[in-house]
Image (tube, grey):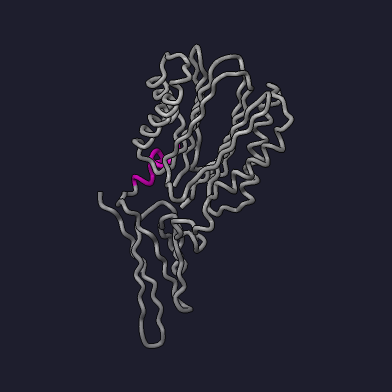
Amino acid sequence: MVEESDTYHIRPNHRLKFKPAVVKRYIHDIVRERLSDMQYDPETVAELTRSLAESIKDKVKTAEFDRYKIVVQVLIGEQRGQGVKMSARCLWDADTDNYADDVFMNDSLFCVVTVFGSYYY
Amino acid sequence: MPCFFFCCICAHLVSTCFSFFIVIFKLSVVPIKNVFTGEDLICPRRVHLFYFEDNFIVILVPVSETLATMDDFMSEDKTTFIVEEVSKIIKDSIETVIGENSYKHGRVNQWTTSVVEQCLIQLSKLDKPFKFIVNCIIMQKNGAGLQTASTCFWDNTTDGSCTVRWENDTMYVIISIFGLAI
């Protein structure tokens, strides 16, 4: 019934905001490490996307963006010359919420990761 | 309908004088006990305690902007993420914007934007206390494989997501909507 004393904050401190650049670096490192020499394999790709999403989420949690809810989306597709378009739009508070994304490609697959951070008032 | 206000008076006799702190707050759903008398009070979810000198406790509670009655807080439809409702909105948006069109590289940009905007407009009309993230993927059918996964760090009781997979003869469309409660 009694919350901590800082629940009256309706805006995060400027230093504690969701920083897209920092998160983009995390995504970049993790994806390159895991996917550099991978081939697209229909059997293992399901497990790979899930575990990649989990690792990225855990890494973003270590950055300790206080009171932020995190959504991580990972997309891995096979490279066969097809056309793909991905877009996202959000109805949120542009002052406090933000997102970070990264794209990785090698000869047989491409991977898009998006991380959204939304402040919980 | 009128709103109910509950008055709680905390009093403490300090040698020669009485001091009163009157706290007025709005009736809501979470029950708590009055620490002095042991009777049940009803308090909104967020309560801030201030210790004022050694012997007083002041309970300050924010009164929300809209004078909603108890019915609004009790009705779960207004505050939860309903997957069927959102799923219907997504399907309608896709049917309206893309329908039976064939994949054309030049038009795909406009389709993704329109579908996502339509979804957001319909979602905002639901008038729920949520922040929404709408994600749309359109891929041409040519035998290639595609896998998507998402994981979230949020409050399971209030937040939710909905993903719809749609296809026609020439393309696949995957739309994900995440709803985060305020």
Q: Is the residue B95 above or below the residue B148 in the image?
A: above
Q: Nearer the viewer, residue A85 or B32?
A: A85
Please give left or right for residue B137 compared with residue B118 in the image: right
Q: Position of residue B147 (x, y in %)?
A: 61, 26
Which residue appears at 46% of the width and 31% of the height?
Answer: B83
Reply above or below: B38 against B73.
below
Front residue of B5/B98: it is B98
Instruction: Pinpoint residue B43: horizontal percent, then vertical percent.
Output: 41, 57
- Total tally of numbered discs in the picture: 0
Q: Is residue B65 left or right of residue B150?
A: left
Magenta region, main secondary structure? helix
Percent position (x, y) of residue B32? 46, 59
Q: Residue at x 40, y 65 (%)?
A: B60
Q: Give the residue at the far bottom of this rendering.
A: B16
Q: Quadrant of residue B141?
A: top right
Query: What residue range appears in magenta?
Result: B71-81
Residue under the image location 59 percent in, 37 percent down: A102
Hey, which residue is sitting farthest right in the picture?
A: A37
Is residue A25 rendered to the left or right of residue B105?
right
Which image quadrant is residue A50 in? top right
Residue B178, placed above or below residue A14: above
Quick check: B105 above or below B162?
above
Front-most of residues B39 and A49: A49
Residue B73 magenta: yes
Residue B109 colored in magenta in the image: no
Query: Residue at (48%, 19%) from the top-left corner?
Result: B105
Front-most of residues A107 and A52: A107
The residue most toward the top is B169
